[in-house]
Image (cartoon, rainbow, N blue to C red):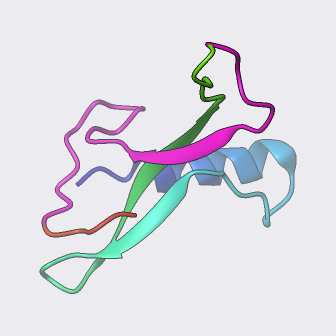
């Protein structure tokens, strides 16, 4: 598994001068070999339509788990990770 997330966070902290700078959308799981793996997640929001075709006022939000690293393109090996 790639270490792009760790490298990007390190570069972010270095460029900002803040060692507490963080990236949103980073998740962790414990792999089959009991090592922590990082991977990227994202979220999206949209408005559902009513029966008349109008949009509801409130937005619905959901999440996605990327299958590949968005930085290098390597496939994540998440095994039996369950997402909600």
Q: Position of residue 17 (x, y in %)?
A: 86, 52
Q: Magenta segment, which residues?
A: 53-79
Q: Quadrant of the N terminus?
A: bottom left
Q: Position of residue 2 (x, y in %)?
A: 29, 50
Q: Residue at 62%, 25% (x, y): give it.
A: 50
Vertical placement of residue 51 versus 29, above or below:
above
Observer-nearest of 46 and 82: 46
Q: Residue at 63%, 15% (x, y): give it.
A: 52
Observer-nearest of 13 and 36: 36
Quick one: which residue is furthest to the bottom in this view?
A: 34
Q: Position of residue 61 (x, y in %)?
A: 61, 44
Quick one: which residue is furthest to the right in this view?
A: 17
Q: Main secondary structure of the magenta part?
A: loop
Q: Count the marks: how many? A: 0
Query: Residue 44 appears in which quarter of the rendering?
Result: top right
Vertical placement of residue 4 versus 47, above or below:
below
Observer-nearest of 47 and 11: 47
Q: Residue at 26%, 80% (x, y): give it.
A: 35
Q: Is residue 41 magenta?
A: no
- Using residue 27 as the reference point, say whether residue 58 is left or right of it: right
- Using residue 11 as the reference point, say whether residue 2 is left or right of it: left
Q: Residue at 62%, 54% (x, y): give it.
A: 10
Q: Is residue 59 magenta?
A: yes
Q: Quadrant of the C terminus?
A: bottom left
Quick one: which residue is furthest to the top in this view?
A: 53
Q: Position of residue 21 (x, y in %)?
A: 78, 58
Query: Residue 82 appears in which quarter of the rendering?
Result: bottom left
- Using residue 1 as the reference point, say whether residue 55 is left or right of it: right
């Amino acid at each position: 598994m790639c270490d792009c997330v760790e490298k990007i966070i390190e570069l972010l902290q270095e460029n900002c001068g803040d060692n507490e700078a963080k990236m949103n959308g980073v998740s962790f799981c414990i792999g089959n070999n009991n090592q922590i793996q990082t991977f990227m997640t994202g979220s999206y929001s949209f408005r559902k339509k009513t029966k008349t075709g109008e949009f509801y006022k409130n937005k619905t939000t959901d999440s996605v788990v990327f299958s590949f690293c968005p930085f290098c393109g390597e496939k994540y090996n998440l095994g039996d990770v369950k997402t909600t």
